[in-house]
Image (tube, helix red, strand yellow):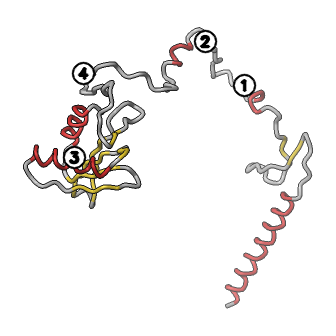
Amino acid sequence: MSSVLSLISVRTKNFEKLSSLCALYTRTTWCTEFTRTFDPAQPFRIKKVPEDIWAENKDPKFTEVEEVKDRWHFVERLFPKLRIPEPPKAFSTAGWKAPSETLPDLPYFIDRTRNHMLPVYETHVYKDKVRVTQVKKVQGDIWAFEVDLKNFLQENLGEEVESHVNEMCCFVNVKGRHVDIIKEWLYEKGF
């Protein structure tokens, strides 16, 4: 019992010393030349804080740095483009097609993304068990678009197609992997 009490008393004495030391360091007056900082080799001494840390640490083993100003155009190529370039006029080899010059006479419109692509995506739902094709940016009569899309897919696939319309977020979900078929259908419509 006495050993436990002596251990507690030693701990409290150390705690008091530590707290008084912390109080000493928090109440230091700041001057321009000397400040109290922690130095593990000499914890209770005043250490000089240098004004310029790079001026005193000149090491001869490191070389000087030279700035070359006439090679900046190599760096400028790495910067991201500030605006998206204009798309080609007809089509590209990757399968991209430009929208038609005249708008189709339909009650709905599919807007392109900012990269001039059709907003048709494949997503996964229910823990990656069900594949869903999503057509975004549907403007106008979204219900007429959903009916036309279902009729087109049922004619091509020969089976019933399940779909879901989100009128607030302007997209239509179709169950299955139909990205390429839907994109070709939208290209034919002129979007």
Residue ID for mark 4: 93
Q: Residues within 10 Å of mark 1 (few under 14, many from 20)?
A: few
Q: Nearer the viewer, residue 3 or 108?
A: 108
- Mark 3 to mark 4: distance in Å? 29 Å
Q: Amino acid at mark 4?
A: Thr
Q: Amino acid at mark 3?
A: Asp
Instruction: Name the mark nearer the viewer: 1 or 2.
Output: 2
* Relative side of 121 to 40, left or right: left
Q: Earlier in the sequence, mark 4 or mark 2?
A: 2
Instruction: Name the mark nearer the viewer: 3 or 2.
Output: 3
- Check if mark 4's residue and mark 2's residue have beta carbons within 8 Å: no
Q: Earlier in the sequence, mark 3 or mark 4?
A: 4
- Mark 3 to mark 1: distance in Å? 75 Å
- Mark 1 to mark 4: distance in Å? 57 Å
* Relative side of 159 to 54, left or right: left
Give x and y (percent) for residue 115: 39, 31
Label placed on residue 148? 3
- Mark 4 to mark 2: distance in Å? 40 Å
Q: Quadrant of the C terminus?
A: top left
Q: Earlier in the sequence, mark 1 or mark 4?
A: 1
